[in-house]
Image: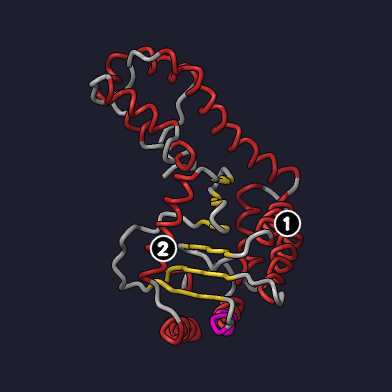
Amino acid sequence: MRPASEQLTQPGGLAERLTALRNAAGLKAVQLAESLGWARSKVSKIENGNQMPTVQDVRDWTAATGHPEVTEELIAMLRAVQEVHTRWRRRLREGGQASIQQELDELTRSATRIRNLQVAVIPGLLQTAGYAHGIATQVSAVYGNVDVDAAVAARIKRQEILYEPGEGRRFEFVFTEAALHMRPCPRTAMLGQLDRLMAISSMRNVNLGVIAFTTKYVTDPRHGFWLLDNDLVRVETYSAELNLRQPQELLLYTRIFQQHAAIAIYGSMARGIIVRAMQDLAA
């Protein structure tokens, strides 16, 4: 899935609106494409979030489906999506990874229930310095930033929230077994990371679940996200940072988290999976 898809295809988003216009006009995707002189696959790509439409594309679409009155509204939605992606790149360039970690720290501290689903990495609040350094180095290689040490320091500082007494915060972490085996850092650092998971899994304010390789999914774990209380969903893609607050989006991501949490393994069984990953790595 291309990065633009997260904003384009969210419920009530631009792709859904464009698809509804086409359906209301009684046109198949290929028919609309042919009427506009486009490649036969272009309409499907836009509707599936695999291609960002241009302003002229939106104008042509609304005219061809007989609803020019919604043109400016949809163009405004398109520009909002484009701005999200531009702002993410600008923030990385100007403030670096550390500023993003500090912002997430502020958002996390304002919440009392913090839920995090991850597919291929260990959740940031659970990372050791060695593991976090590997992640930050990868991000730096993609975006050209050089603030790896500052990013690691900010991420480690965020973890103080796990140990603050009397705050009444609950943390729920769910990640796949794959995250225990994929290594962004040297073997010794990864062993240290797995050992830390063993310790954190016994904390009273932390619920740590692992989705085993053999588990049948209800919904595929497409990407990771944070769910802060019932107020904010935060998603990071390669090119954008998405802060979703619409009620339908909050309900959607809450349901997805619950589905994954329901099939995860907890307690001693989760620790058994972590121990096996440590043994495999040690061997």
Q: Is residue 199 magenta?
A: yes
Q: Which residue is mark 1?
A: 102
Of labels 2 and 1, earlier in sequence is 1
Q: Which residue is mark 2?
A: 258
Disc 2, SS:
helix
Q: What crowding class fits label 1: few (fewer than 14 Cα within 10 Å), some (14-19), or many (20 or more)?
A: some
Asked where in the image residue 49 lies, by quadrant, the reply is top left
> Which label number is shown at residue 162?
none
- Nearer to the camera, 103 or 51: 103
Asked where in the image residue 217 lies, by quadrant, the reply is bottom left
Q: Is residue 114 left or right of residue 23?
A: right
Q: Residue placed at 24% from the left, 21% from the top?
A: 27
Disc 1, SS:
helix
- x and y, in percent, of residue 24 in the image: 28, 23
* 268 w.r.t. 177: above or below: below
Residue type for callout 2: Gln
Q: Is residue 266 left or right of residue 154?
A: left
- x and y, in percent, of residue 202 in the image: 55, 84
- Nearer to the camera, 55 or 239: 55
* 274 w.r.t. 256: above or below: below
**Magenta span of residues:** 196-202
Q: Nearest to the eye among marks 2 and 1: give it.
A: 2
Q: Is residue 94 left or right of residue 76?
A: right
